[in-house]
Amino acid sequence: MKNFITTADWSQAELQDLLDLATQFKQGLSSQALHNKSVALLFFNPSLRTRTSFELGTWQLGGHAVVLEPGKSAWPLEFEFGTQMTGDAEEHVIEAAKVLSRYCDLICIRAFPKFEDWQIDRQDKVIKAFAEYASVPVVNMETITHPCQELAHMQAIQEKLGSAKKKKYLLTWTYHPKPLNTAVANSSLLIASKFGMDVTLLCPNESYLLDERYLSLAKQNAESSGGSFQITHNIEEAYQDAQIVYAKSWGALPYFGNWEAEKSIRDQYKHFIVDEEKMALTKKGLFSHCLPLRRNVKATDAVLDADYCFAIDEAENRLHVQKAIMQKLIQH
Amino acid sequence: MKNFITTADWSQAELQDLLDLATQFKQGLSSQALHNKSVALLFFNPSLRTRTSFELGTWQLGGHAVVLEPGKSAWPLEFEFGTQMTGDAEEHVIEAAKVLSRYCDLICIRAFPKFEDWQIDRQDKVIKAFAEYASVPVVNMETITHPCQELAHMQAIQEKLGSAKKKKYLLTWTYHPKPLNTAVANSSLLIASKFGMDVTLLCPNESYLLDERYLSLAKQNAESSGGSFQITHNIEEAYQDAQIVYAKSWGALPYFGNWEAEKSIRDQYKHFIVDEEKMALTKKGLFSHCLPLRRNVKATDAVLDADYCFAIDEAENRLHVQKAIMQKLIQH
Amino acid sequence: MKNFITTADWSQAELQDLLDLATQFKQGLSSQALHNKSVALLFFNPSLRTRTSFELGTWQLGGHAVVLEPGKSAWPLEFEFGTQMTGDAEEHVIEAAKVLSRYCDLICIRAFPKFEDWQIDRQDKVIKAFAEYASVPVVNMETITHPCQELAHMQAIQEKLGSAKKKKYLLTWTYHPKPLNTAVANSSLLIASKFGMDVTLLCPNESYLLDERYLSLAKQNAESSGGSFQITHNIEEAYQDAQIVYAKSWGALPYFGNWEAEKSIRDQYKHFIVDEEKMALTKKGLFSHCLPLRRNVKATDAVLDADYCFAIDEAENRLHVQKAIMQKLIQH
């Protein structure tokens, strides 16, 4: 694979190879795979873990990462083709991608949806444009999926449970005062189903279903991997016997760009918070979240501070899996 | 010591060890104490010297520094505990400190007071929370004290005067159009008294006294070190025979959060500016300031451009003392 | 030369030396000329290419670059002398230049005009103040000229045409919705005339003539180098037989600070866009632009995507020429 944009493009065996290399890095493997090489990190949105782990991972592999923020420290970019650029954008992605390819050996992109029109956002235009015009590999640092988070999550699951296969996995929607990106939720379904888990998606009602593309991929993955996929709106049923509980909030797709209308609906579901009562329904279930997380909104202090919470381990794994991804892509 | 948060936690001998190592660095000592190690630099406020000297110091010791700006390039953070995070903060310091501890070997924090309520600001919650939840050493890059500046200042004083003991030291308040942080003023008292200087604090009136905590520490330090500490509002008396004049502006604590009321008071004291007339009262006194400094507001061009001004030397020393601090903490 | 502020200070032979070294870097020359050395990159304005290429170039030469943004991540700076600093600026360039000279071995500055008063902007105060007070070499990353772009441009021209001498060179003004900096236009005239090209400046009318300083320098350069320099407002005449077409938009100097008045004039000249019809008038002419560029405003998609467009090659050369500049200055 030239790029790392979505795990849907990678087989389970290929992803397991990345995870095995990540585990070697975690155990102390030293590599200079990026010796004399450089990486462009383009952030259209804020970041703590992603920036730190990509910048340090690049450095640990002997390379150098440049952090660019289009629209802030760097020029605002245009992603439409054939358009007359009379708006805010000073530069077209065609030039940005081509020029960065001359300077750098990898281009990594964080570009969240604009939350105005899901039919546009779901096309993932920003990273696809970079991938089309860059002559070096492109890595997804979160757009409409978050594949680096997927691998960090799965590495942590395998650390805790050994094989993920046929383990009971719950992705639960939670409340959040703002409508958030569906990326990590989409990614949660993709990776858990790819590795043969028995996956349950819990959300308040049909409005909070994820995009059909990811529901279909989860079904297909489950069929191929020997896992299963089901959807429920019943909290008690969802938590029953779960071995992994993964929490995420997201905005309802039918209300995209019309958030005032959704707010009154969303506000009725604050009780989706992950708390000790719900965790008690699980089969000694483990909890995680991609972070950042609002305490006592998405999950309680008690859950986050419990021994069964592995969110910090998952965050650490970001460093290891990203080093594996960069090394594989550069050696391709 | 695990952390470097305030010099009040360090003995004079320990601080002198740091200064001696800093001097070795200044004389060309090469060290790879941070080989394969990384440092997180968290800036909640702007910086020129601090950022440059920490980033370069880390690199000179073989490590790599990551610069993070919570609320700008990184997520805004919450520092209250047990709260329901429904405000602006997307992430809690608990997670930020734990995650950064997985990626980095040192965490350095710049977090100025919010200038709304000194009873809250004086608790220094931000850096204390990081210190509590981080598993790696935490370094103060200026909060309510500025201990790195203290060491750079003392290194410069020793360069100029040899031993600081019993030398006459003046900390003078100056005018500034905005109410500034008291950190460097607190720090000035702490370090000068710790090293046995005869310390005078000059400020316009009782409203401009520093927090009782630092006045008490200055008295205690003076008793232990054989120095002395006095307060005056009389400019001529204060400058008389001074060997070091250190200037700083700060907001009056009784007016914290009520700056309009203070402004009319502060505006009466523009004559506290350090000028040649006042310097002529000293005993061939040397002048310095932590920088940044507004010329012809805090001190005149003539004072800043005089041979007796060592502000640039002091700024250079930031690099050397911070390398010493990082090396000591990492080798602890 | 201590500094690299304008190519007007350098002879053609000296510039050719830089170009030759740049070509060696492009061909794979490895150098550790900045080993243990550091570079301050001060950006008062946004950047993609400049930041990336300077940061990576420094790293490739064994050094480390620190990126500073005065007024954002770093303190706002004052450039007037003898003034009472009661405005926004917290720090004077005197201190900033002196302190950075203690930490770093080179200081690079991007400081665009303020677009309020050309009589002030044309003095290039910011970089000149740094050059005066810094004790290390200062490099221009674009102020009222853009000499690094000049060298990258000339390196690309020599790659395409061999010697530039007596080749027909067109600098054409183009439309842009905002009044832009004249820096690259000034630079285009300086470098093309320095290398003996037959230079034509095409602009809509007398209001769009560049500053007399650069018109005079172009004439003088042409006389010394055996080239020529002419000005025209006739599009067809200008393009006739051109071998290099370089496009740039800029604001009209007589309307500096009065942009509303200029807008209605500028809007009449949208047809100055570089398109295939105009390029067909040339002698198999090549096209370039310094980037960033608004597609279908300054030049059409067809021109930018044509084989005769070398803007990406020119952008790549930024890396190579800047490494040459930094190496020469540091070894001086």
Image: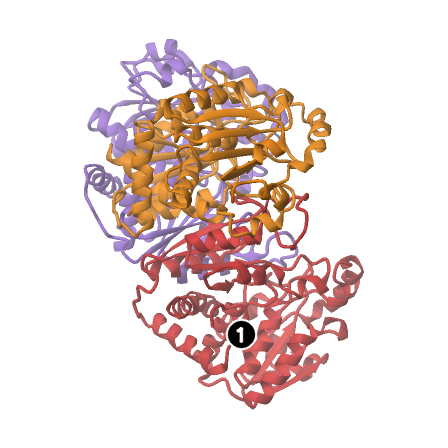
Chain colours: A purple, B orange, C red
Question: Residue C199 at x, y = what percent?
Answer: 61, 83
Which chain is disc 1 placed on?
C
On the question of residue A140 being in view, the answer is no
Q: Which residue lies under the disc numbered 1?
A: C7
> In the figure, C46 relative to C276: above or below?
above
Q: Residues within 10 Å of mark 1 (few under 14, many from 20)?
A: many
Q: Is residue C271 left or right of residue B290?
A: right
Q: Nearer the viewer, residue C239 or B211?
A: B211
Question: Residue C117 at x, y = what percent?
Answer: 73, 60
The extreme bottom residue here reads: C226
**Image quadrant assignment for residue B19:** top left
Residue depicted at 68% across the width and 37% down the height: B271
Q: Is residue A151 left or right of residue C285?
A: left
Looking at the rendered structure, the kind of residue marked 1 is Thr
Count of marks placed on residues: 1
- Quadrant the N terminus of chain B occupies: top left
On the question of residue A283 being in view, the answer is yes
Residue depicted at 78% across the width and 57% down the height: C260
Q: Secondary structure at mark 1?
A: helix
> In the figure, C274 relative to C292: above or below?
below
Q: Nearer the viewer, residue B280 or C218?
A: B280
**Image quadrant assignment for residue B273:** top right
Question: Residue A29 at x, y = what percent?
Answer: 19, 43
> In the figure, B304 relative to C325: above or below?
above
Q: Nearer the viewer, residue C50 or C16?
A: C16
Question: Residue B150 at x, y = what percent?
Answer: 43, 35
- Quadrant the C terminus of chain B occupies: top left
